[in-house]
Image (spheres, rainbow, N blue to C red):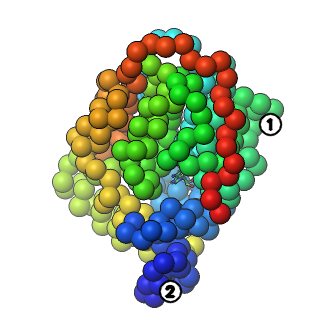
Amino acid sequence: MAGVRGDSYATRDGSPLPDRSDPGFERDVRRMFSHIARRYEWFDHVASLGSDLLWRPRALWDLDRFRPPGPVERVLDLGCGTGELTRLTARRFPSATVVGLDFTAAMLAVARRRADSGATRVAYARGTAMRLPFADGVFDLVTNAFLVRNLVDLEAALREMHRVLRPGGVLLILEITEPVAPAFGALFHAYFDHVVPWLGAAIDSAGPYRYLPESLRRLPPRPAFRAALEHAGFARAELRTQSGGIVTAFLAEAGGATEPRPPTLRRPAAAAGP
Ligand SMILES: C[S@@+](CC[C@H](N)C(=O)[O-])C[C@H]1O[C@@H](n2cnc3c(N)ncnc32)[C@H](O)[C@@H]1O
């Protein structure tokens, strides 16, 4: 492999391969998602053998059982990408306003094209999960799917998610995780670490699909993740695994004193980065 660091083009075919130890990591994550935006959903369905179509609805079902009863008026879907979870969430909570936020313009462009006609309750905005352009305590729910592996500082991002939730509001994080049973884990890694990158390189490009297994290795194990949620201020946290632990829904309720929340969301700030 060519390995030109300081730029995202680190693979022989010139496709972006973000490197967490590189200062340009976030920029390269953005370039990588720009590069795959048009094929993202399609490749996800193929590589997950269709399972991702079940993971998101099941996580919303888990969220419903976890959250305290009460109306849901404002939802933020972070790292919304092409809007798969955003659209499901808007359907699940028909009286809520749903904001999808992402820092990759090309992913948002696909999301906007896919928006249900007349879906005025869904708004897409460009911005980074590391500095959310919203006032404190304005959301009833914050969701994200397959985002947190890509974050430069997980703990800081969890604090941001907590900040924008009202006390008693709920966070749902859906992410790829290590399978629970070691024997299944060996099988999973044979597929995820070797077959998926090979498939990606064969039908698309090498970098993004080499990055995929690398990004999973950087995620804290489930107990440490749960501790990080509590450390960020969440009062109650639960985990729900799916597909033998290949994905986990992390659910957490925001703690803090009950204060009246501001009446409106602050407008999203200008675009994040190039
Ligand atoms: C794997 S995709 C997941 C998309 C979508 N949530 C889904 O369920 O398919 C990850 C998304 O997170 C976005 N992302 C990564 N880091 C981000 C950050 N720091 N702030 C905002 N978006 C980010 C990427 O641009 C990409 O669209």
Residue 178 appears left or right of 51:
left
Q: CA distance from mark 2 to mark 1?
A: 41 Å
Residue 231 appears left or right of 175:
left
Q: Residue at x 47, y 84 (%)?
A: 4
Estimate the x, y position of residue 68 in percent, counting from the top left.
43, 14
Q: Residue at x 81, y 32 (%)?
A: 118
Task: Report the amino acid beneath label 1.
Answer: Ser
Using the image as rendered, state which of residue 177 and residue 267 is in the foreground.
267
Q: Give the number of the mark in front: 2 or 1.
A: 2
Label 2 CB-ligand 1 distance < 8 A: no
Estimate the x, y position of residue 271 in percent, counting from the top left.
67, 52
Image-quadrant location for residue 191 = bottom left
On residue 191, the disc is none
Residue 125 appears left or right of 58:
right
Estimate the x, y position of residue 136 in percent, counting from the top left.
53, 28
Estimate the x, y position of residue 46 in percent, counting from the top left.
52, 59
Task: Report the amino acid beneath label 2.
Answer: Arg
Quick one: SS at disc 2? loop
